[in-house]
Image: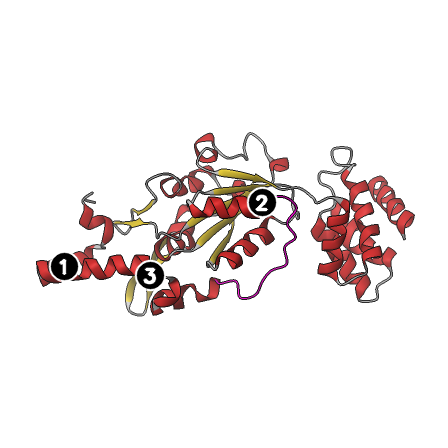
Amino acid sequence: MRNDPFMRTYSPRQEAMARAAGAQNTAAASTQSAAALTRPVSATGSTADLLAPYLVKSQPYYRSVADEVELYEAAYSVRMPIMLKGPTGCGKTRFVEYMAWKLGKPLITVACNEDMTASDLVGRFLLDVNGTRWQDGPLALAARHGAICYLDEVVEARQDTTVVIHPLTDARRVLPLEKKGELIEAHPDFQVVISYNPGYQSLMKDLKQSTKQRFGALDFNYPEHEVEAEIVAHESGTSLEVAKNLVHIGERARNLKGHGLDEGLSTRMLIYAGSLIAKGVAPLAACRVALVRPITDDPDMRDALDSAVTTYF
């Protein structure tokens, strides 16, 4: 692929058409293309149609616990890639959804896994009744049209897959589509956000330093007791008193992390238990189903957690 300014903006088919049209048409097309890049998503019909499914339609409930909202807004204003670090079920994904809604930007989420390839992110050629066509992957779609691309649990992906985000997360802000022979220059509204749980890190499952140092980072954890109880009550529909008891159980279970439990009870799990209680399920049964049974199969550990439940219910 030639690395000239023309090829950095147009695909080969567009290049042939533009050069055949002459210098005057090329200049006009370039002006229109530049205008389209700076135009809001809602003003361009085709782009709006592509990104409409990814807009967060209603305000997600998010209870800020520090200055994470202001810090993220500052990071987005300079399009800094952001890394969210924290235990499972502590609100990382909800935070991204809330910020996308607050900023009015589409959010394209990718649940990373070990079988994910670079083509799953950037795109591939597909066969249909009309022949071969190119299909943008979620990363290419976000970069081309201006969305926030959220890679959830990014360390679950292979390192040879995650390196494809490197050109988009430094000063270049480009995405090479090698199979297509195209270089996407990231839309001004584009941003990469990744998340992972540092508690699951190992030598085999961790981000490379060359990846980490391309991101700013926000640390997340389970909220303080009163705040977490407020969140559980709001999200589950149960009473604040019941929510406080559930948070007490969660805090006792988290103290067992590393002493029989790989991970403590998440805020998400407490909400599940509260939702069952709000539907009329007995608290002891709700906690067994939503808190104790999912997290461990060890009989002694189950007995310990059951004892914590009976203390508060």
Q: Was residue 279 drawn as part of the magenta stretch in this picture?
A: no
Write down the residue under mark 3: 39
Disc 1: CA contacts within 10 A as few (<14), some (14-19) or many (>=20): some
Q: Amino acid at mark 2?
A: Glu
Disc count in the image?
3
Q: Is 298 above or below relative to 33? A: above
State how far apart marks 3 and 2 are (Cα).
29 Å
Q: Which residues are magenta?
A: 55-66
Local SS, label 3: loop
Query: What residue is shown at x 71% (from left), y 40% (from top)?
Result: 263
Q: Position of residue 151 (x, y in %)?
A: 50, 48
Write down the residue under mark 2: 68
- Camera-side residue of 249 and 24: 24
Query: What residue is shown at x 56% (from left), y 40% (from top)?
Result: 218
State how far apart marks 3 and 1 are (Cα).
20 Å
Looking at marks 3 and 2 on the same chain, the residue that comes earlier in the sequence is marked by: 3
Local SS, label 2: helix
Q: Amino acid at mark 1?
A: Thr
Left or right, residue 28 beside residue 58: left
Q: Is 22 above or below relative to 253? A: below
- Quick check: marks 2 and 1 in contact, CB under 8 Å? no
Left or right, residue 185 beside residue 105: left
Q: Amino acid at mark 3?
A: Arg
Q: Is residue 115 visible?
A: no
State how far apart marks 2 and 1 are (Cα).
45 Å
Q: Position of residue 146 (x, y in %)?
A: 39, 56
Write down the residue under mark 1: 26
